[in-house]
Amino acid sequence: MLSQKASRIPPFYVMEILERSQELERSGRTIIHLEIGEPDFPTAPHICEAAYNAMKADETKYTHSQGIQELREAVSKNYNSKFNLDLKPNQVIVTSGTSPALLLVFMGLLNPGDEVLMTNPHYACYPNFVDYMDGKAVYVHTAENGFRLEPDAVANRLDQKTKAILINSPSNPTGQLMSSKELQSLSEVVGDIPVISDEIYQGLVYEGEDHTILEYTDNAFVLNGFSKLYAMTGWRLGYLIAPPDFVRPLQKIQQNFFICANSFVQRGGIAALCGPQEYVKEMVATYDKRRRYLLQRLKEIGFVVRNEPSGAYYVLADSREFGQDSLALSRRILEEAGVAVTPGIDFGDGAEGYLRFSYANSIDKISEGMDRLREYFDR
Ligand SMILES: Cc1ncc(COP(=O)(O)O)c(C=O)c1O
């Protein structure tokens, strides 16, 4: 019999929409993909070459459980130079993506009944990680506040059981970016409670400034990875930056449950961080063009975007004009217009009535998707 925890876990709707669209494609339909948060760019050749060379040189064995030393140095150096910090390579634990890093941090922090505060809407999988570790997700609803996390609202939800505050800036699904002032106030409000900061969209910023929580507090666990900024989703590479006292306990969890991240993939990560960054700048400039274009087209169709996104590659648009039930609406749009989008409900009830559009797709495809939607709703 399936465990209670396994039977409780809800589907990740974006994957269900993707899988259904692939089924439609196999039957001959063309589908415009605006659902998935996956860069349409290939991984840069110098990154692929580094991994390939590592394989050829027989770097196909287990690595140190915390990751190859050069990669840990590259990660800490990258954060230190970008944000003027003094992180040590030993604070870094390399993982097979940001998702295992999330699991590692919750495994390391949560006792049964411990609460983790997070926004609603939030990245779909967050509450499921917490639930699986016998913790409890506690929400701060942000829709009324333009999807911004108010430090005062956090203060109101803190109690004896609060074990951590989970933030995500730039955010999936809202594209909102926390300002320096907001991060500063948040770290003051939470006192001794650690902040877990998912910074996977760091660098994908089009307006405002990029920050890390580590500029404001040392009492933080930072999660990041190569999937988004470096277009490396399939490589499965990420990392956790932890306060020094937590590194050894987390390392032991890593040794037991994951052993280490893939060896040659880590060489690709070193090439990503230490190699040329021009192609990253070009990708960011392209996302920005798409963001502006998509926003304009969505508004023309009748979607409402009250707070424009300034980071990541998502627009969370109010679609109540077209239907209150976001899952039913996204299924209808997929079946009848051939456009795949993610229902807001995937991100919590705070995004019900919304659809998330990803602009990790070409302008031509976005344009075709918007033409189809306009025609569909006009009908
Ligand atoms: C906010 C957020 N965190 C984590 C992840 C997972 O990233 P990874 O591919 O590094 O596991 C995603 C993927 O979409 C995400 O949007």
Image: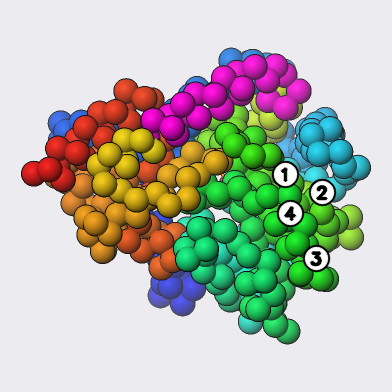
Residue 256 seen in render: no
| Residue at disc 2, secondary structure | helix
Most frequent secondary structure within the magenta stretch: helix
Residue kind at label 1, given as amino acid type: His
Residue kind at label 3, given as amino acid type: Glu
Residue kind at label 4, given as amino acid type: Lys
| Residue at disc 1, secondary structure | loop
At x 73%, y 54%, the residue is 181
Label pair 3/4, CB-CB below 8 angstroms:
no
Callout 3: few (<14), some (14-19), or many (20+) C-alpha neighbours within 10 Å? some
Q: Which mark is residue 211?
A: 1
Label pair 4/2, CB-CB below 8 angstroms:
no
Q: Disc 2 designates what residue?
A: 215
Residue 63 sits in which quadrant?
top right
- Is residue 301 rendered to the left or right of residue 187? left
Q: Disc 3 designates what residue?
A: 188
Q: Disc 4 designates what residue?
A: 181
Residues rendered magenta in the picture? 272-294
At x 54%, y 24%, the residue is 285
